[in-house]
Image: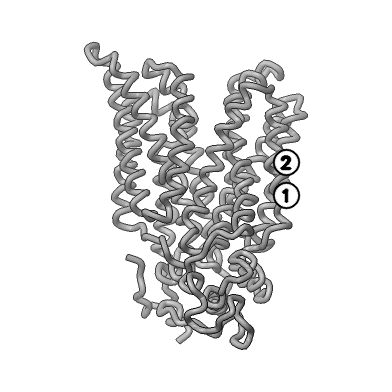
């Protein structure tokens, strides 16, 4: 049965015909070497494609990091009230939710490269609107457009990277998405101390232009090309990505077989996601995003300075320390991704965020006890830095890696839109509610975040699969069986 073939790993005839000479000079089993086993090296085309894609991630980071250094300049020059500037800051998330709703469909219709280029139209227009704005309306309009572009980029960048990389490199390469977000935010924060807010917005267009100029020189996702029935283009793109002498027959055949089987089914809709067939993928994808956001990351990042001040510590010193921890820990997570695997990093990361939030909660409790009050700032700094480092190690990037891996190609558009929307909605809810929670109970707020991080540890241990070293087709066939007879599963 066709439905059983995916689960059992049976493949149809290869995409590269048998009588075509193999590029490595061998037609047998011994000639493929590492490539036949799915272990490939990072070619120049693969590295270039990833760098062009993560230029969009850097755009994401610049947008997130812009509002803090630009605040005083914008409010003074344009005469904005605190409430008006709060709208400017928060409307980015509204735009990201709008972009997220359509991200999967757009990426399916015009391709991964097309979606990245389309998103940059929003980002460039938005940055220019901010540069030339004369009042709050233009500021908000520009910020909304940038948010729409961010919503698209937050989905399509990790999906594109996951679809072009071999299984032994996929985790590390996909996590560069999160690393570049951190770099974009940190560098923008630092540049904001040197240039005015209009120049800072103009600088924000540079990574957008780099991506727009670079996209025509990188291949489209082979898996999207296969989904579109463009088999020759799929083969050519895969050969460019793996190298001229690489033996790609096995990988190409696997992509073709899995895609052809899925195409026998009707086009998926969002409602189709809620079938039992896709239950595990949906629970894992949405669950990780919910736990990531409700673990308090945006509350801690957006209000880090206020947290330090409330706990009696210097906000400036604390914020600089956060930046110093974030980038090295994200880099470490990227290096370890394909060595230790996704699950161990997620478990360590979630445990660290639990400990960090618990320490911050203790710091606020100490404020009410005279004998322990002087230790409060130390616990606050220690807790936020532990949280920041642990989150950067795994929980920041791995949920996006797993999201890009677990949904089959016919469901990826709808599933990706839903998961990305949930992430941005959670971000907005926590950012909006945080100040109210802090007024209710500062210590209680962080104990709630700590509890959610503890639940994340259990969630990862019980439900999240290890996807290291598996092709996308193996992961998706295992998690989303096409028939009840398919018992193949990821441990």
Q: Secondary structure at mark 2?
A: helix
Viewer can see residue 194: yes
Residue 177 sits above or below residue 107 on the image: above
Residue at 67% over, 16% down: 76
Please tell me how many numbered marks the rendered image carries. 2
Callout 1: few (<14), some (14-19), or many (20+) C-alpha neighbours within 10 Å? Answer: many
Is residue 481 toward the left or the right of residue 86 in the image?
A: left
Measured as percent of width and height from the top left, residue 301 is found at 47, 32
Marks 1 and 2, how far apart at CA? 10 Å
Residue at 72% over, 49% down: 212
Measured as percent of width and height from the top left, residue 461 is found at 30, 54
Residue 326 sits above or below residue 45 on the image: above
Residue bearing mark 1: 212
Measured as percent of width and height from the top left, residue 138 is found at 73, 31
Residue at 34% over, 33% down: 357
- In the picture, residue 467 is in which quadrant? bottom left
Residue at 68% over, 58% down: 218
Q: Secondary structure at mark 1?
A: helix
Measured as percent of width and height from the top left, residue 61 is found at 58, 38
Residue 425 sits above or below residue 358 on the image: below
Is residue 365 toward the left or the right of residue 481 in the image?
A: left
Q: Are marks 1 and 2 in contact (CB under 8 Å)?
A: yes
Which quadrant of the figure contains the C terminus? bottom left
The one nearer the camera, 343 or 27, is 27
Callout 2: few (<14), some (14-19), or many (20+) C-alpha neighbours within 10 Å? Answer: many
Residue bearing mark 2: 124
């Amino acid at each position: 049965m066709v439905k059983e073939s995916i689960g059992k790993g049976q493949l149809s005839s290869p995409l590269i015909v048998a009588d075509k000479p193999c590029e490595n000079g061998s037609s047998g089993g011994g000639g493929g070497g590492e490539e036949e086993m799915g272990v490939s090296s990072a070619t120049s085309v693969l590295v270039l494609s990833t760098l062009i894609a993560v230029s969009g991630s850097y755009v994401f980071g610049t947008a997130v990091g812009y509002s803090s250094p630009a605040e005083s300049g914008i409010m003074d020059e344009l005469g904005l009230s605190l409430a008006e500037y709060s709208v400017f800051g928060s409307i980015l998330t509204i735009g990201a939710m709008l972009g997220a709703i359509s991200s999967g469909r757009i990426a399916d219709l015009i391709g991964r490269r097309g979606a990245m280029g389309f998103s940059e139209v929003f980002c460039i227009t938005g940055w220019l609107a901010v540069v030339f704005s004369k009042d709050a309306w233009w500021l908000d309009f520009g910020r909304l457009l940038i948010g729409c572009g961010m919503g698209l980029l937050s989905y399509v960048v990790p999906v594109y990277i996951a679809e072009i990389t071999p299984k032994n490199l996929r985790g590390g390469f996909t996590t560069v998405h999160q690393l570049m977000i951190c770099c974009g935010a940190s560098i923008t924060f630092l540049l904001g101390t040197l240039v005015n807010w209009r120049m800072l917005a103009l600088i924000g267009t540079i990574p957008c232009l780099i991506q727009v100029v670079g996209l025509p020189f990188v291949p489209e996702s082979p898996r999207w090309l296969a989904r579109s029935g463009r088999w020759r283009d799929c083969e050519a793109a895969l050969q460019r990505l793996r190298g001229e002498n690489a033996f790609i027959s096995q990988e190409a055949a696997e992509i073709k077989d899995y895609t052809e089987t899925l195409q026998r089914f009707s086009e998926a809709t969002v409602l189709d996601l809620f079938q039992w067939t896709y239950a595990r993928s949906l629970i894992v994808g949405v669950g990780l995003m919910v736990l990531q956001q409700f673990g308090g990351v945006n509350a801690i990042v957006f209000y880090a300075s206020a947290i330090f001040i409330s706990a009696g510590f210097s906000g400036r010193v604390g914020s600089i320390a956060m930046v110093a921890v974030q980038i090295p820990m994200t880099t470490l997570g990227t290096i370890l991704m394909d060595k230790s695997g996704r699950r161990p990093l997620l478990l360590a990361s979630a445990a660290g965020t639990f400990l960090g939030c618990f320490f911050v909660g203790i710091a606020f409790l100490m404020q009410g006890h005279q004998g322990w009050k002087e230790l409060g700032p130390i616990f606050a700094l220690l807790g936020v830095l532990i949280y920041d480092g642990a989150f950067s190690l795994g929980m920041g990037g791995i949920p996006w890696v797993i999201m890009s891996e677990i949904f089959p190609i016919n469901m990826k558009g709808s599933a990706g839109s839903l998961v990305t929307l949930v992430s941005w909605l959670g971000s907005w809810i926590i950012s909006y509610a945080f100040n109210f929670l802090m007024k209710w109970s500062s210590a209680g707020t962080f104990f709630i975040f700590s509890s959610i991080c503890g639940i994340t540890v259990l969630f990862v241990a019980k439900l999240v699969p290890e996807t290291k070293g598996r092709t996308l087709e193996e992961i998706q066939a295992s998690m989303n069986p096409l028939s009840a007879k398919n018992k193949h599963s990821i441990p």
